[in-house]
Amino acid sequence: MYQVVIIGAGPVGGRLATELAARGVSTLMIEEHAEIGRPFQCAGLVNPPAMNMVNLHETILQNVDGALIHSPSGIMVPVGQDGHVRTHVVCRKRFDQGVVAQAMEAGAHLWLLSKPLDAEVKPDGVEIKVEREGEIVDLKCDLLIGADGAHSWTRRYFKMGRPKEMMIGFQADVSGLESKPNWLEMYTGKDVAPGLFAWVIPTGNNSHRIGVWSRAKDLEGRSVEQCYDALINHPLWAERFANAKEIARYCGPVPCGVIRKPFKDRVMVIGDAAGMAKPTTGGGIGPGFRQVEAIIENLTKAITNGRLKTNDLAKVCKPFKAFRKEQDRARALRELIVSIPDDEELDSHFRMFNRPEILDLINIEGDIEHPVPLGMTLLRKVPEFRKLAVRAGFKLLFA
């Protein structure tokens, strides 16, 4: 019998297993795939604070100093500074394997080619039926934790609700594309990324990841693959992408918005399973690592003391309320500046962003992990944005 069984051995599940095992909690990770880090469904960005938690700098393919952000009509706003690293592009297979290896070095166990079939919460633990390499195995643990991603079996099986938003992402690996060293690119507009944005991320050796994400309601019957095609064939950008040769392509959901009750008696969910991805960028590794850091001490005490009822886990998961509030404010800011405006209004925003005094403000106060303080500063200090503050209303100011 294990004290904790974690469904999913991605980076957040692996990070949690590391921290639990390091504190003497017997932990098993269950992973349905044959190897860690596959299939790959992510832009592969890891921010410096998250990277420093795991010290896997050898997995970095490229550092990113800034972003060249393009409006629908082609107005370009550079955000960043050469030599000042904003985020890292990693090899997700090596990164994920590194995180899980740390968990195993700390004492956690791993089952590959394994998936849960059934689970029942009893007064003294959780009984789980697992298919392991084609055989049915019965397990028992004190606490079951779902770190099993956007389509979380744990969240669905225990009827724990749904994230506030479920975006759809599509990405292709390409070669033959040139770009400004250490800078990524972003593209906006209803033709290429309605409501959100498309990206071009350098991965070293003249290779890139080109992707798009959007919400189903904004796609209006189109697919994200069609948006991708619209980007690389767009009259403004077709020459830019003319020499790009596709190596691989993949698609997946992006869950944003922490679910209301990510816990029940002896069961909880974290990471993408709980809806921790950022509404502004879709990134999930940094928020997931912060989530683990926020709960680990109280979670360990609850496990050790056998206090794993719903009310006990509510106390452990109290920091999730702050994460949800942070997401709500970031979402309101995104809606205000990117998602709601039409292309003409987006262009007007970009013309304002491109003024030297505003660019200076963005580069001084901008933080890819915490965009709300910058957004609030723009709403307060830039006259043209003050009318947007009225539109934002209480949702942004007091969420």
Image (cartoon, rainbow, N blue to C red):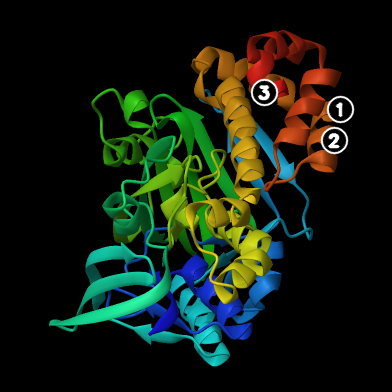
- Between disc 1 and disc 3, the foreground one is 3
Amino acid at circle 3: Leu
With 106 as the anchor, is 255 left or right in this view? Answer: left
Residue 381 is situated, as x and y percent measured from the top left of the image, at: 86, 20
Q: Quadrant of the N terminus?
A: bottom left
Q: Count neighbours of disc 1 (C-alpha within 10 A) and say few if under 14, some if 14 to 19, many if 20 or more.
A: few
User: Helix, strand or loop at disc 1?
Assistant: helix
Instruction: Kindly report the distance in space between the C-alpha atoms of the residues bearing marks 1 and 3.
Output: 24 Å
Name the residue rendered at 40%, 32% in the picture. 192
Instruction: Kindly report the distance in space between the C-alpha atoms of the residues bearing marks 3 and 2.
Output: 23 Å
Label 2 close to label 1 by CB (< 8 Å): yes
Instruction: Kindly report the distance in space between the C-alpha atoms of the residues bearing marks 2 and 1.
Output: 5 Å
Please give the residue where the numbered disc 3 appears in the rendered image. Answer: 396
User: Helix, strand or loop at disc 3?
Assistant: helix
Which disc number belongs to residue 357? 1
* Residue 45 drawn above or below residue 139: above
- Between disc 3 and disc 2, the foreground one is 3
Amino acid at circle 1: Glu
Please give the residue where the numbered disc 2 appears in the rendered image. Answer: 360
* Closest to the observer, 52 or 191: 52
